[in-house]
Image (cartoon, rainbow, N blue to C red):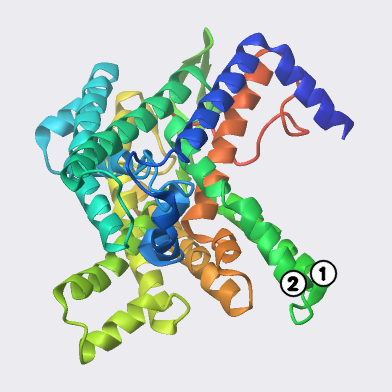
Amino acid sequence: MKRFIDTIKNIWAIDELREKILLTLGLLLIYRLGSNVVLPGIDTESLTGLQSQADGGLIGILDAFTGGAFSNASILALGIMPYISASIVIQLLGMAVPSIQKMQKEGESGRRKLNQITRLLTIGITMAQAPGYIANLTSQGVAVSINPQLFWTQSIIVLTAGTIFAMWLGERITDKGIGNGISLLIMVGIIASLPQAFFQELVSKMERSGGGLVLFVVEIAALLIVILLSVGLVQAVRRVPVQYAKRTTGGRTFTGNMARQYIPLKVNAAGVMPIIFAQAIMFIPITVLSYSGLETGNATWLVSMFSDIQGFWYNFVFAVLIILFTYFYTAIQVNTNQMAEDLKRNGGFVPGIKPGKATAEFLDTVLSRITLPGSIFLAILAILPAFAMTAGVNTQFAYFYGGTSLLIMVGVVLDTLQQIESYLLNRHYDGLMKNGKLKGRAVSAF
């Protein structure tokens, strides 16, 4: 406890870090307040149908990412998700469009151009999604107190402005605050439902047939174990040794063994994207069949299978898709050919491996081998909430036992803590960990 208090004092003693943390907290508070501002013209008492719709499925996931703004018909109902969608589209285009690939290699100037394109694409996606959201409002019986045409027009404008405002808040946090702003906005939305889910689970377990306090403590212990495993997955790396004939660092020149460094290949280089892709694919059959009116015969069985998140076939297909998408997204994120070329250009090589093509093949082989256990572990984490629900855990609380929510929270917290630790070490204070270094951090060879 004394060390924790000393660490807080050290953080508060650094003026720049203190200002960044306060700015970040202030902007996050503004985002949370905006999530509770209802669209103009809506009767708030008629939102019960929309809120019941957000209890599960794809709508429930969107509502969790927006911190309840989706089910509240808020001005930030679409949240930051259109920006995430635009970013994914740009990354995928980078594989096929030469002009995008050229921007990705242009350094800071290319990054600014891509950011501008992403912003414009975000506006386009938001304006396309806003009418769908408004149509969903009307289909759920949400009452409107103004002219319908006026409501549609102003709501599309307000929802688009709300997403742009959320995007601006995220960028301001990244530039002026601490941590990745976009990720922090998503994490805050997810955490917003945690206290309510926690107390609901506690109350249900304290009931006569709930199992009592002992069972609740067991559930919390299991949750902590899952969090530890998630931290291990996020931080796990395979260090590939790299040798340099000569290396200059900090004004000193190292040769031979002193010039050895490592390439950290992450066991889970794809992050949470495979789960997001897999969830999107899983909801496509339900959406198509529901809106086409073909929910008969074999289609009924298909809809039932993809709707039962505790069913065997749902979780089996979900896990297989996650494994496949992990390999797919890892191939997008990690360019082994570029890594081999950069090594060769800087006079580096992997001991025992020829520079160039042979190095790229070696890195690709290592990456494929470590991705398999990483993808399987990621799939297991993704379906853990279904096992938690089967074991009797409240549905809302069970979502924190794995899946996208848990991995996003773990990744964002670790990234933010690493930034805070860097400030402490640069000011000659002790780090957050006893050894002054967060475990799992690896030094890149580049």
How many numbered tags mark residues here? 2
Q: In which quarter of the view is residue 435 placed? A: top right
x%, y% of residue 260?
52, 30
Work out whether residue 262 or residue 145 is closer to the camera in this orientation and state it.
Answer: 145
User: Which of the image's four quarters has the N terminus?
Assistant: top right
x%, y% of residue 57?
39, 66
| Left or right: 294 in relation to 82 | left
Residue 56: image tag: none
Label 1: element kind: helix
Q: Which residue is mark 1?
A: 213
User: In whole angstroms, how far apart are the C-alphas of marks 1 and 2?
Assistant: 7 Å
Residue 369 visible in this rendered orientation of the protein: no
| Left or right: 89 in relation to 233 | left
| Left or right: 373 in relation to 133 | right
Q: Dots 1 and 2: beta carbons under 8 Å?
A: yes
Q: Which residue is mark 2?
A: 205
**For the point 44% across and 49% down, which residue is it?**
65
The type of residue carrying mark 1 is Leu
